[in-house]
């Protein structure tokens, strides 16, 4: 029996929408997941408070997932297998050309969009040749030159319209009091984005989250800087969110996605993996794997969003493995951020940005840290995914660091200058604050204790002040009034314990 729920048309006429889902069988046994919510997202319950058998659903395709998410009551949705974000209602997987062909009515001019021609339309050398052909009254690219120039002039306007067509397909909108949980380690949303927008009380657990590849990104800086539309999870003005035991990456295999080479551009079709902005609050991101991505987590919007973010944006980032995350792990703006007991694995083939007064103490004898720190440079990393930095500190943020472990391979495996970066720090009257707690042990780099991570942070500040990239006093190192105000799932006595815990607990189960 299909479920229907009441909708209201703009003219006040009630209608019912039939959904292609039904509640799980009462005999269904959910998977056993050991973690409990904690930290800033610790009061979230997702759909777990509704224990009625009528509130539990098992979904295995895009249509079922969208229908289940739309239900206007507390519910728990279990994902069975891989759901493809680009799966059309007829079961086909949409291509970029499909999104073009789905936009407008049959024969509409917008269906003449061509991505290569879109890039050519912004190439002044190329458009000058078209103007020359017009002046000489000759054809260009087999077309009337004037008509061809008119066609190219529409490309930039058509692009965002087509992007909206794709967004309506690959976007999955969560509602209040909802849990989305993978049945097992095969559960995935492949090429889809979870939109957590203007909602409260959501869990996303035990899922592989593969962000969509944008068919219609916009170029920024030649050859590899692009503005793409999609994250794996996009959070806007949402509260009480717990993301736990997930794996966030750019394809199911977890490997880097090489950019498309078009007209000399390296077309990057990805944005973030987990981005949050616009006054989102009380969020815990725990026991996840963030894998092989270039700008992984942006927490906080731009300067114009500061009034909406200040006083909110409380995040706990705990027990995660960042493997091959080139930047933003996370980057933090205008909020309060506890970055605790995470493991960072990177290939660093860059020269140090500056010299630091911090030193590395004798190496740990722990075999797991040493073995994971062994390795060579990775020549297959796309240009846009080359390692830049780990933690980004921005305007008016309060950042608390404790028990993190760093592992680097590559040409400079002991470089400490890329642990932190600073940007948009121009307000000494409202400084960002960074507190580095060294609890029972030092954070380590490749098993060698960093004698004072506070010194690394201060040296980072000094470098950015000296180079004119920030205003003196806009970021300060202090722990005054900053503490962890909640109980963590585990207390650690050594870097080795952090690594053992994260390797066992992070990711799907």
Image (spheres, grey):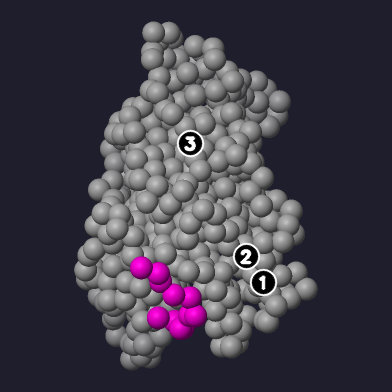
Q: Quadrant of the N terminus?
A: top left
At horizontal 51% and vertical 53% (from top left) the residue drawn is: 440
Q: Indicate yes or no whether the magenta region holds residue 360.
A: yes
Residue 428 x %, y %: 73, 76
Where is mark 2, residue-wise? 434
Give me the C-alpha separation between circle 2 and circle 1: 6 Å
Q: Nearer the viewer, residue 149 or 273?
A: 273
Give me the C-alpha separation between circle 2 and circle 3: 29 Å
Label 1, secondary structure: give it. Answer: strand
At horizontal 63% and vertical 80% (from top left) the residue drawn is: 470
Where is mark 3, residue-wise? 204
Give me the C-alpha separation between circle 1 and circle 3: 35 Å
Residue 67 x %, y %: 47, 27
Count of numbered circles in the view: 3
The image quadrant that residue 184 belongs to is top left
Mark yes or no: residue 253 visible: yes
Residue 128 x %, y %: 38, 88
Q: Earlier in the sequence, mark 2 or mark 1?
A: 2
Mark yes or no: residue 257 visible: no
Q: Indicate yes or no whether the magenta region holds residue 330.
A: no
Q: Which residues are magenta?
A: 352-362
Q: Is residue 266 above or below residue 70?
A: below
Which-is-in-front pick, marks 1 and 3? 1
At horizontal 38% and vertical 15% (from top left) the residue drawn is: 29
Where is mark 1, residue-wise? 476
Q: Nearer the viewer, residue 251 or 92?
A: 251
The image quadrant that residue 304 belongs to is bottom right
Q: Are marks 2 and 1 in contact (CB under 8 Å)?
A: yes
At horizontal 51% and vertical 43% (from top left) the residue drawn is: 491
């Amino acid at each position: 029996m299909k479920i229907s729920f009441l909708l209201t048309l703009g003219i006040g006429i009630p209608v019912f929408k039939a959904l292609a889902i039904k509640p799980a069988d009462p005999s269904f046994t959910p998977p056993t997941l050991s973690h409990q919510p904690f930290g800033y997202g610790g009061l979230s319950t997702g759909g777990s408070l509704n224990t009625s058998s009528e509130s539990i659903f098992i979904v295995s395709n895009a249509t079922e997932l969208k229908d289940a998410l739309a239900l206007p009551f507390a519910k728990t949705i279990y994902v069975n297998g891989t759901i493809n974000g680009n799966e059309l209602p007829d079961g086909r997987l949409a291509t970029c050309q499909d999104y073009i062909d789905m936009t407008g009515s049959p024969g509409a001019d917008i269906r003449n969009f061509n991505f290569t021609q879109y890039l050519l339309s912004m190439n002044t050398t190329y458009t000058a040749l078209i103007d020359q052909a017009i002046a000489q009254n000759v054809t260009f690219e087999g077309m009337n030159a004037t008509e061809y120039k008119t066609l190219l002039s529409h490309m930039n306007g058509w692009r965002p319209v087509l992007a909206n067509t794709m967004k309506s397909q690959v976007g999955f909108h969560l509602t209040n009091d909802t849990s989305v949980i993978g049945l097992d380690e095969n559960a995935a949303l492949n090429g889809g984005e979870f939109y957590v927008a203007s909602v409260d009380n959501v869990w996303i657990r035990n899922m592989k989250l593969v962000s969509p590849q944008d068919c219609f990104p916009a170029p920024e800086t030649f050859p590899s800087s692009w503005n793409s539309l999609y994250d794996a999870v996009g959070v806007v003005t949402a509260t009480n969110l717990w993301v736990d035991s997930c794996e966030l990456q750019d394809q199911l295999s977890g490997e880097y996605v090489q950019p498309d080479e078009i007209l000399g551009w390296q077309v990057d079709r990805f944005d973030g993996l987990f981005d949050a902005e616009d006054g989102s609050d009380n969020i815990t991101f725990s026991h996840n794997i963030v894998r092989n991505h270039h700008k992984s987590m942006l927490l906080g919007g731009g300067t114009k969003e500061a009034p909406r973010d200040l006083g909110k944006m409380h995040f706990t980032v705990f027990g995660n493995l960042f493997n091959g995350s080139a930047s933003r792990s996370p980057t933090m703006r205008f909020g309060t951020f506890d970055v605790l007991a995470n493991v960072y694995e990177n290939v660093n083939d860059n020269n140090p940005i500056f010299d630091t007064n911090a030193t590395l103490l004798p190496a740990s004898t722990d075999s797991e840290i040493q073995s994971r720190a062994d390795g060579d440079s990775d020549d297959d990393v796309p240009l846009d995914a080359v390692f830049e930095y780990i933690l980004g500190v921005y305007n008016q943020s309060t950042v608390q660091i404790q028990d993190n472990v760093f592992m680097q391979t590559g040409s400079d495996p002991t470089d400490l200058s890329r642990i932190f970066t600073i940007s948009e720090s121009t307000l000494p009257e409202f400084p960002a604050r960074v507190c580095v707690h060294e609890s029972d042990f030092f954070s380590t780099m490749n098993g060698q204790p960093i004698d004072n991570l506070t010194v690394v942070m201060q040296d980072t500040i000094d470098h950015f002040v000296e180079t004119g990239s920030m205003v003196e006093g806009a970021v300060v190192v202090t722990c005054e009034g900053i503490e962890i105000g909640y109980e963590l799932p585990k207390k650690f006595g050594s870097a080795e314990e952090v690594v053992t815990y994260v390797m066992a607990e992070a990711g799907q189960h």
